Amino acid sequence: MGTSDATALARAATSALWVLAAIAIQPARAAGPPGGPLPHPDEMERCYRQIREGQFDAARARLTPIVAHHPDWQRATFFLALTFHEEQRYAEARPLFARALALDPSSPDVPAIRLHHGWALYYLGELDAAQEQMTAFVKLRPDHPDGPFALGLIDFDADAVESASARFRRAIELSQAAKDPRSEGKARARLADVHVRLGDLAAAKHELETAVRLRPDAYEAYFKLSRVLERLGDAEGAAAALAKHHEVRERLRPTAPPM
């Protein structure tokens, strides 16, 4: 996986915090004997808000003593894992996700745990384990596009292009049903990769043009579009797409390394 794809996927995983919106506002209690007084019921909401705002060190400072004193509190362990995951420190997040899942495999938090655990495993190259988590997530949330999208990436990495294509198309359908253009755009950009691998550049061009229309900030899709247009002999279009790639990339990620 290239640097751009890895960064884009990390951003996709960050946006997957959608799962937490429903659970974070519900009060959570520690399971088992507490190791000291429980924090205020709003503490998890504060930590969640800090994670959403990118204040990972601050959230970790609050969560670490909570987990130490209440190791059976699933949500606290899960949120602590997220502070590492959202910084792309997947090796540190992975055991915490596994521990959180083992604490209560049937809690309302489990879909979110499985989804983020699956992404961490994917980034660490543990594709079989990632597939297991994502498959379980799809069973729990068959309506959400992140499941088939992630499974499509795993299939694509294994060169199972027909299966990957079906997964990405399913992610597109679910994104449209959810009126989620960003998820649709990222799925279309990866479906374009399938078309490129199969040699269908016209289909790839269509998907990438749709992807950047849905996600105007998808600089990696502009780069892919420039390469497809170049191969199709459209030098002017390729130059315009490449210029757009640089413009958006510089605006969003001014310190990003060269591609």
Image (cartoon, rainbow, N blue to C red):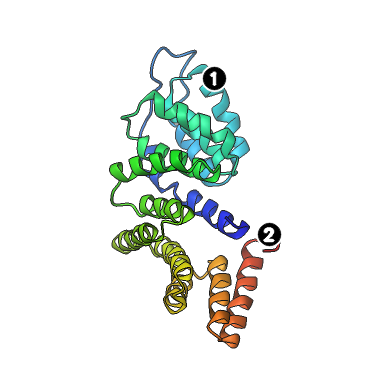
Residue beneath label 2, please?
256
| Residue 93 in the image, given as x and y percentages of width and height | 54, 35
Q: Quadrant of residue 25?
A: top left
- Of residues 78 and 26, the one nearer the viewer is 78
Q: Quadrant of the C terminus?
A: bottom right
- Of residues 173 and 28, the one nearer the viewer is 173
Image disc number at residue 250: none
Q: Secondary structure at mark 2?
A: loop
Name the residue rendered at 58%, 78% in the picture: 241
Task: Say whether marks 2 and 1 touch (CB < 8 Å).
Answer: no
Residue beneath label 1, please?
68
172 on left or right of 90: left
| Residue 105 in the image, given as x and y percentages of width and height | 34, 28
Residue type pointed to by label 2: Ala
Residue type pointed to by label 1: Ala
30 on left or right of 55: left
Q: Quadrant of the N terminus?
A: bottom right
Vertical comparison of 66 with 139: above or below: above
